[in-house]
Image (cartoon, grey):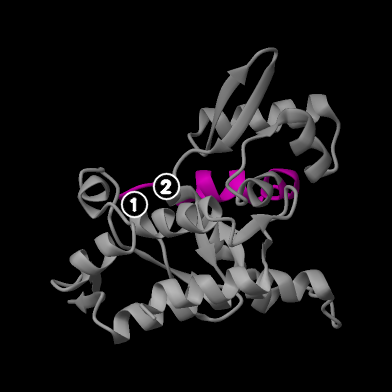
Amino acid sequence: MKEGPDISIVAALIGDPARANMLMALMSGLALSGTELAAEAGVTLSTASSHLAKLENSGLVEARRQGRTRYFRLADPDVAAAVEGLIPIATRVGHLRTRPGPRDQAMHHARSCYDHLAGRLAVALLEKWLACKVLHEADGVLKLAPSGRSRLERMGIDVCSLQQSRRPLCRTCIDWSERRRHLGGSLGAAVFDHVLARRWAVREGRSRVLQFSPRGEQNFVRWYSGA
């Protein structure tokens, strides 16, 4: 007798190429319309609507109406983590371009992973915060270090507010491009918001790519390094 959740249902929903392309597009963290997602998936609007209904009914995406248009987002960070976790597996077994272009390098450097930062800059931040005791690991769980709270508060992160959320303060994702971890959770989302609010980086359209200006990147590294 088989027990526990049936992952085959979710796997089948994600496994359809059109739906997978929609979910990947929503990994930018932006809310996209059915028309935009149809273009991302390469299908007609009516076909996209059918796919989106299945994703919404399964709890993988959620929709909100603004005027006459419905906009879709990933339902929660767990969905984003599941999609991101599949990327390194797909990288190993899938067909990749042999000559990565500029966009590939930009994705590796800095991108959104739903609502937090991913790529080389994100990996470097987590490693720095572990090294300087902002964060520490206990029994394999990432936690805020005793000395980390006051430091983050000085950096403009409202830790008290983050800890009142039901969402974990700290969690990690395996970064598919760097094969190391980056910071997620409500703290990772707060860092991402901080970067965008100060315009150290800007989104590149609907892409996951984040474009840091040279000065913006310097400011970001100086900020998280405590320099």
Residue at 71%, 30% (x, y): give it. Answer: 33
Is residue 44 rendered magenta in the image?
no
Residue range (magenta): 1-21
Q: Residues within 10 Å of mark 2 (few under 14, many from 20)?
A: few
Residue at (23%, 77%) from the top-left corner?
136
Q: Which residue is mark 2?
A: 6
**Foreground of the two, 6 or 175:** 175
Q: Nearer the viewer, mark 1 or mark 2?
A: 2
| In this picture, residue 4 sits left or right of residue 212 | left
- Mark 1 near mark 2, Cβ–Cβ under 8 Å? yes
Q: Is residue 4 magenta?
A: yes
Amino acid marked by disc 2 = Asp
Instruction: Examine the residues drawn in magenta and state their main secondary structure.
Output: helix
Instruction: Specify the quadrant of the image occupied by residue 168.
Output: bottom left
Quarter that holds the C terminus:
bottom left
Label 1 sits on residue? 2
